[in-house]
Image: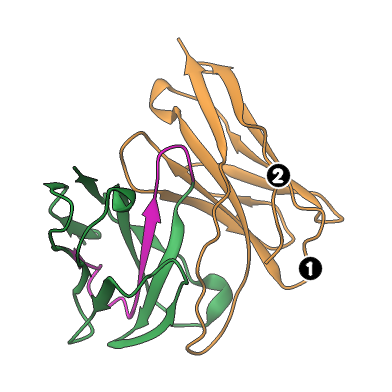
Chain colours: A green, B orange
Amino acid sequence: DTGVSQNPRHKITKRGQNVTFRCDPISEHNRLYWYRQTLGQGPEFLTYFQNEAQLEKSRLLSDRFSAERPKGSFSTLEIQRTEQGDSAMYLCASSLDASGGPQETQYFGPGTRLLVL
Amino acid sequence: DAKTTQPPSMDCAEGRAANLPCNHSTISGNEYVYWYRQIHSQGPQYIIHGLKNNETNEMASLIITEDRKSSTLILPHATLRDTAVYYCIVRVGRYGGATNKLIFGTGTLLAVQP
C-alpha cells in the first residue's frame, strides 16, 4: 500500500487564477476528506465523501471551492478566482468505513501547499 | 465532540520518555480519544486511539484516566525524529454515512533535545 498521495505538492499562482489539486486515497478506502491548514493552526475540515457522494461541506468551503470524486476513487479540489487568503496547505485523508464509526482511522497525504501572490 | 486542552509546547531529552498530557473534561461516554502528530511540512500521522482502556502499539502508549477526563500519550524512548506537533482529538464515532471529521486544536509542539 502506497498511502495517500497528493499532487502537486506545491503550487504558486496569481490572484484570480483557478487551481486544481488531486488526491489519490489508499486503494479500497471508501471515505475521503479534505482539510485546510494555515500557518500555526491545526487542520480544519472542508468536505467529506463516502464513495462518490459528497455528504458534508464546511461553511469554510465558499462557492469558489468545488470538490469531486467522480468514480469513488481519486478526488479533485478546485479553487476558482483564488485570493491571497486561500494560501494554505490543503490536506487529503482517506479511511475505510468497514466496521462502523468508532474504529475509523483517517490516513493523511503529504498535502499540497498553495501560495497565492 | 468534546474540546481538548494541551500545553502549547514541551521539551524532552533524546532517549527519555515523552509524556504528553491532554485534558478532555467534557468527554462523553461514546467519545474516543485519538492522537495524531504532524512533523514539519508533512501531513498528520495517526498514532493511537482509545476509549476506556490503556492502549499500546509500536509507536506509543495511551493512558486514559479512570474518569476519562484526561489522557497521556507516552513515547517510551523519544528520538530527534519524534519532534513534531502532537494533536489530541476527542471524537464520537458516527455510523453509516455520517462524517467522522476530525476537529484539530493547536496541539503540543514536542521538541526532542539531543
- Mark 2 highlights which residue? B5
Residue B44 at x, y = what percent? 40, 48
Q: Quadrant of residue B91?
A: bottom right
What element does badge 1 sit on?
loop
Give left or right: position of B38 versus A4. Answer: right
Residue A107 placed where, x, y %? 37, 60
Q: With A19 as the anchor, is A26 left or right in this view?
A: right
Number of marks in the image? 2
Give the residue type at disc 2: Thr
Pointers 2 and 1 within a single chain: yes
Residue B43 locus on image (x, y percent): 34, 48
What residue do we see at 40% from left, 67% from top?
Answer: A46
Q: Residue B28: give its label.
A: 1
Q: Is residue A36 above or below residue B30?
A: above
Element class at badge 2:
loop
Chain of residue at mark 1: B
B14, B23: nearer the viewer: B23
Q: Earlier in the sequence, mark 2 or mark 1?
A: 2
Q: Please tell me whether residue A33 belongs to the stretch shown in magenta.
A: yes
Q: Is residue A19 above or below residue B83?
A: below
Foreground residue among B60 and A48: A48
Name which residue lies at 55% across and 78% down.
A101
Q: Is residue A107 magenta?
A: no
Q: Residue at x 25, y 60 (%)?
A: A4
Report the residue at 67% width, 33% height from top.
B7
Q: Nearer the viewer, mark 2 or mark 1?
A: 2
